[in-house]
Amino acid sequence: MYFCPTCSNLLLVQSDGAQQQLYCQTCPYIYPVVKTIVQRKTLDRKQVDDVLGGDEAWANVDKTDASCPRCEHDRAYYMQIQTRSADEPMTTFYKCCDIKCGENAELLVDLNSEYRDRRKDAVKRVIANMTVGKDVSSLFPQVVKNMQTEDLEMKKLVYLYLMNYAKSNPDLVILAVNTFVKDTDHVNPLMRALAIRTMGCIRVDKILDHLCEPLRKCLQDDDPYVRKTAAICVAKLWDLDQERALENGFVTILQDLVSDSNPMVVANAVTSLAEMQESSVTKDVFVVNVAIMNKMLAALNECTEWGQIAILTSLADYKPLDSKEAENIAERVLPRLQHANGSVVLSAIKVLMIFMRYIKNEEFIKGLIKKMSPPLVSLLSSAPEVQYVSLRNINLILQKRPDILKNDVRVFFCKYNDPPYVKREKLEIIIKLCSDKNIDQILSELKEYASEVDVDFVRKAVRAIGQCAIKIDEASERCVNVLLDLINTKVNYVVQEAIIVIKDIFRKYPKRYEAIIPTLCQNLDSLDEPEARGSLIWIVGEYAEKIENADELIENFLETFLEENSQVQLQLITATVKLFLKKPSQSQEIVHRVLQTATQEIDNPDTRDRAYIYWRLLSTDPQAAKAVVLSEKPPITVVNSTISPGLMDELINNISTLASVYHKPPTAFMGNKAFSADAVKKAAAEDAKDQEQIIGDAVLETGGTSSPATPKNTVADLLDLDFGSSEPAYSSPTMSGKPAASGSNYNADLFDMSSDMSSGMTGGGAFGGLGVMNVPSPQFNVSSQPAASNTSNDPFGDLGGFGQPQQQQQQKPPTAQSSAVNDLLDLF
């Protein structure tokens, strides 16, 4: 119905010869009809209100005995409502207590409805209930009946229901087999793929008997969409029954699909074969050879991003025949670095990092490294979670190839809105990229970080400044100046962290920055953290001869010796002994008090044992003690790689996986398998055997010369140290008048104090009971000359029961003393 826009009267229809027109009876308005006029309006149904108030009204009602007419349950909720006038009685309403009764009963009626729309709506409601966790398994037969439809949407919903509840109703699943088989012959390829995908997802043994023939037809289907779906289904069948997959020849058909003309079929076939290879006992399901490698590379550029990841992962397992083939593969993989998906980029980088092991052309390797930098930088423009994964992989790559990203340090500077976990990773990478060319901008950036509000991040930034100083000799003075500026800020946690860092700088550069010690000592009272207090104590003890009031500073710490942390106590003992060896006249009383307190009143075995070792060492040979305690410290360095070479190669093989994020091999956190260093060494040895052919050619080219000897592993030597060795060592003089045994081990003698120290014990207990002994006051003779026959000539007097009998304190042979010093150095 149309109305006149002028007078609002109803327009009528009339014919004007050639065409129809609408005209108004009141005014001269005419509207010519030049095309078909259609106007449709859908009337909205009125919303039916729940007169009982909905589910909330039934929340706190009472129960009573009543039989449900639907499920015959004997209990029901009831509620009384006044529905009529006040003089009429209230109406009682009942609701079954069985939660499965109400809604499921309604769905049951709708699933059996004769109207298609109601059935489809019921199936949607069933899936919605299933998604939120409601049990709708009782509707299994009624849902299965709705499989017989041409509606693709409804069929997808029914198949989804079957995949979820097939295990709970294995006997009823057989009802759907005929429909599945029929759908695999459907004209629509989407229907065929949907049927074979659903059959593969239903993990019930009864379905496997009917799966083989439809699967074989789909693997040879004309449509590539059906073939790629069937390829994944083979892997699912393999997971359930490997023998059935082999007997029906599905593995061979799948291997042939790697040569398919469609790249997506190739990608899915590679994915299935790779997964089957992992669970195969013989490991011969998918062996990448030259032919397969070329087919995968041909399909690499045309498949989807997930297909590219699968192909690149399989390519990483291929071992090239020579350096030239490795270069060709690397060149064909290089375009994947420009992909928008970060996982594809990391997978391509993994392939390049692996194939670099086989490439001999250094110029080609440099070109690859140069092309790998921009993709890694572009990964940092993603979401924080993706950034973190990228940074962990970049950290791993830098430990293997430090020259990557050497000119891109600025992209790793922290932003104000970066999460803490991203900032920490960026700091680690900044330290690895630090060099003499970019140290100025890095120091400026780190100094800014030290003024942040995040205390943990500030501490790491201050520690990073110290690591830069240790790493770059030329920049150490600038780093120290920055640390002094931070100390002058008087921020407590910044000052303490700076002192800890400066201690490491003193270890790296001894006797270079001694002028800053007074500035450090001014902050003595503000130190409350054990590590900071221990660092300052170490500095005072190490430079005691240059600090006039070193004894006063040590005395200040000794006031709370018993309440200090064990780390501080250990440093105090060592610093006191150093002070005594450097200034014996000023610190005799201090060292006596510290050693006596540590051996009698401290329960910590580490603290007590160190005090006894120093006591015994000073009593036995002061010169040896001086050589050990005041020996030149080995310089410290910043280790660029914190991962062993064997583990590094395994992690490189797992770039873009969880292993590269955890920096642990997959066996350490998957499969409940124990991980050990022996397993990594074994894997590294096997990998080295695989490379013997390539490396052997290089050795032959150099004339067969052998490689230099491998440097000795000092850590392994320390672990193999045997204190009970029978090898002859320095023979220490006896302490109780007993002659020294020929060829006795000084280290063993150092710990065997049960007999030698009997003169200083009240209880005469063994070494394990030293904590309750009454140890006399120690007075140490630091003179290198033999003691005179009269004790009055000794400037420090008798050693309080621990000293040697005067007739036995003889000058030690130089060679024997050197042996003792070496043994003690090995001990510490």
Image (cartoon, grey):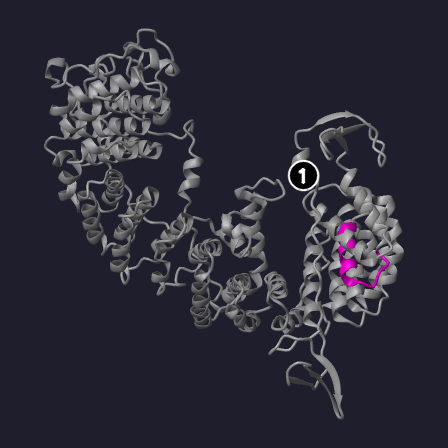
Which is more toward the observer, 304 or 335? Answer: 304
> Is 174 situated left or right of 566 in this image?
right
Question: Residue 149 colored magenta?
Answer: yes
Q: Secondary structure at mark 1?
A: loop
Please say if 172 is above or below 551. below
Q: Residues within 10 Å of mark 1 (few under 14, many from 20)?
A: few
Please say if 818 is above or below 234. above
Residue identified by numbered label 1: 53
x 19%, y 40%: residue: 490
Percent from the top left, x then y, of residue 237? Answer: 78, 54
Percent from the top left, x then y, of residue 205? Answer: 84, 47
User: Identity of the amino acid at label 1?
Assistant: Gly
> Is 64 situated left or right of 55 in this image?
right
> Is 365 situated left or right of 309 in this image?
left
Q: Is residue 97 visible?
A: no
Quadrant, the N terminus: bottom right
Residue 296, quarter of the rendered image = bottom right
Quadrant, the C terminus: top left
Which is more toward the observer, 763 or 699? Answer: 763
x 83%, y 63%: residue: 150
Question: Residue 320 colored magenta?
Answer: no
Chain part drawn in magenta: 147-162
